[in-house]
Amino acid sequence: MRALTIRRTSRRCGLHRPMPGSFAGLGLVLLIAGCAQNTRIVGVSPEEQVELRTRAVNLLLRAAGSDIDVVACNAIESLVRVAPDEGLDAYREAVRSPSSLVRYAGYAALGEVRDRQWLRRIKAGVRDPSPRVRLAAAFAACRCGQDGYARVLVSPLTDNPNENLRADAAYLLGRLGEARAEKRLRAALRFPANEKSNRATLYINAALATLGHDDAVQQLLLYAQGNTPTRVDALLILADLGNPAAQDVLRYALNSHQDYLETHLIAARGLGKLGIREGFDLAMRMVRYTARHTGPDDPDQKMRMRSLAAHALGEIGDPRALGALRELAADPADPRLQVAASYAICQILGD
């Protein structure tokens, strides 16, 4: 929901949706007052690194309680990746949210950390009014050792007419990491409705690739090279997988003059995960994207580009990016960007 998460989890959390009009009640404070304008950080002491990471995590914790669902969702998905234990109270609170998007993120996070102490609430989530939330709660229950809830994830692969829910179910099955799901996932690929749905087929292959099946990786590479509407999703999945087989496709997407800037930044992120820093200069330029050419029909262009750039810098892991990222995290104008920057800071600094 990936807001941030923003990885498939980011798009899933609505990173590209229009932003609500006001952030007045969010209460996110400056990450570092008076941040240096020089993006090259030299001689940062271990103590200063600890302080910077602490401030970044604290910002994510505050954002997880935001009443803006996209901000809260992205913050939760960021916390579960970079500070899973520190975010536990935030995940538990999220499942009580009136927003189905936030509840989804909360249950998925509880599953990631295997919060067995919260199992009663997780089981209750399988009866949530939202079908997407029910999937996330079933995922959490399975992660906590309740194998009987796997059917809640498996049955939508062929029983649900909504291709997005079928894709959600496949995505969560992949995250579950259960090898026994392969048979059901492969059967779902032959289901007529999925054969007609690029999106559902894409995420079924993504689940199989997550489980370690090379043939599914090859299918994702084909999607990433095509002209289908799911090409960007395929690149996002490949960027998350970190599979070396994707290196050539990602490098082409980074350098192709025919691709959109969004695609270049996703490719930079994927290459960064593979330890290749070719997209660093581009990401550094775009983290301060001014959107001079943005028209009235796309007011979120600036946010999208800067957020994707922040995520690319986080995966690349070059500490030279810390100055630009802490400036972005210190700017309260858009909490989505604060979350993206804080997440990237934590990625670069590690535990």
Image: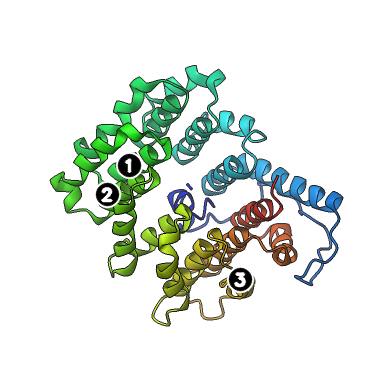
Q: Horizontal and vertical percent for residue 87?
A: 64, 35
Which secondary structure lies at badge 2?
helix
Above or below, comparing residue 129 to residue 301 in the picture: above
Which secondary structure lies at badge 3?
helix
Q: Are marks 2 and 1 in contact (CB under 8 Å)?
A: yes
Q: CA distance from mark 2 to mark 1?
A: 8 Å
Q: Are marks 1 and 3 in contact (CB under 8 Å)?
A: no
Using the rendered image of the protein, determine whether residue 125 is visible from the camera's viewpoint: yes
Where is residue 281, by image quadrant? bottom right
Using the rendered image of the protein, determine whether residue 229 is visible from the camera's viewpoint: no
**Going from the N terminus, do you reach mark 1 or mark 3 first?**
1
Quick one: 54 or 338, which is closer to the camera?
Answer: 54
Identify residue for label 1: 170
Identify residue for label 2: 200
Give the amino acid type for the residue marked by disc 2 in the picture.
Answer: Ala
Which secondary structure lies at badge 1?
helix
Q: CA distance from mark 1 to mark 3?
A: 32 Å
Q: Is residue 19 left or right of residue 317?
A: left
Give the amino acid type for the residue marked by disc 3 in the picture.
Answer: Phe
